[in-house]
Amino acid sequence: MKAFRIIGRNIRDSFKSVFRNFALSLASVSSITITLIVVAISLVLTYNVNHTAEIMADNIEIVVFLEKGITEEGIASVDEQILSLENLETHIYKSKSEIAEEYMGESEVFAAIMATWDEEENPLQDTFIVKVSDTNLISDTADEITEIEGVVAVNYGKGMVEQLLGFFEIIKNGSILAVGALILVTAFLISNTIKITIFSRRKEIDIMRLVGASNINIKIPFILEGLFLGIIGAIIPIGLTIYGYYRLYDFDLSAIMPILELVPPTPFVYLISGILLAIGVGVGTFGSWRAVRKHLKI
């Protein structure tokens, strides 16, 4: 019971201290709020850029063209060999008549031209549409398919696809490094702001030491105060993230950025909110602990 009373008293005193030293607390909270807003924007951009890159990479397909006049047995043989590929995710067979029907459904011009074709006059080729498990190995998989008997050509945008995948990888690694660096800078700024707050109250710490308070009893109220400042400072960034992202998701971005596909808000915004709260609490607590610990060593 005594331990609970001590903890309760420390929490109460820490909470009161936040408002008692309002100007300093406001400076710390403002620093946390501003930097966490920047972190939130960076995280939202990074997640969505990577999400769009992954979708584009997943939509890369290999179109396998079969020999003209290939028999059903030949198609079955090609199908079996494609099915044995290690890097295969899915594959779909499309006959030339099915391809013609798709074209006719997409364009009235194609419909007018192709409607007169019979099976023999149709110049299109039977195909397989192949999706791979690992797009980084798409070139090797395409080469394997080319060697299959009955296959005359494959097409997946060779050269352009490799460049696109390399570009996606650069974006992914660069965005991760940028967010990581931003979080470190944020931690440094918030920690220094809280250190200034603690330093301005060094007389209060000295009085506590003079009356016989142990180091742990001195540290706990300040650490809890840093925790409260972190929570308060994270409230506005979390609210802006949730409200702003839902509004952004409802807004039609296709006219501005047609290739960008946003991550669905739920549970994305709550994940970002959890990260912001963790950064605010972690940095606030660590900054207070580090500042008091350094002063107690003097």
Image: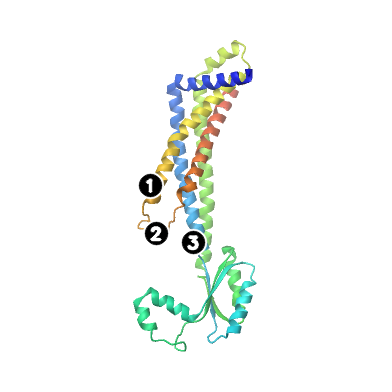
Q: CA distance from mark 1 to mark 3?
A: 24 Å
Q: Which residue bears the numbered disc 2?
A: 258
Q: Which residue bears the numbered disc 1?
A: 247
Q: Which residue bears the numbered disc 3?
A: 56
Q: Residue furthest top?
A: 211
Residue 298 appears in view: no
Residue 157 position in % (x across, y down): 50, 70
Q: Identify which residue, 4 or 12, lies in the foreground.
A: 4
Name the element at disc 1: helix
If you read the primary sequence from the N terminus, does the residue marked by circle 2 or circle 1 appear first? Answer: 1
Q: Identify which residue, 206 or 275, lies in the foreground.
A: 275
Report the side of 88 relative to 178 (left or right). Answer: right
Q: Residue at x 53, y 15 (%)?
A: 204
Q: Identify which residue, 42 or 192, lies in the foreground.
A: 42
Dot 2 amino acid type: Pro
| CB atoms of marks 3 and 2 within 8 Å | no
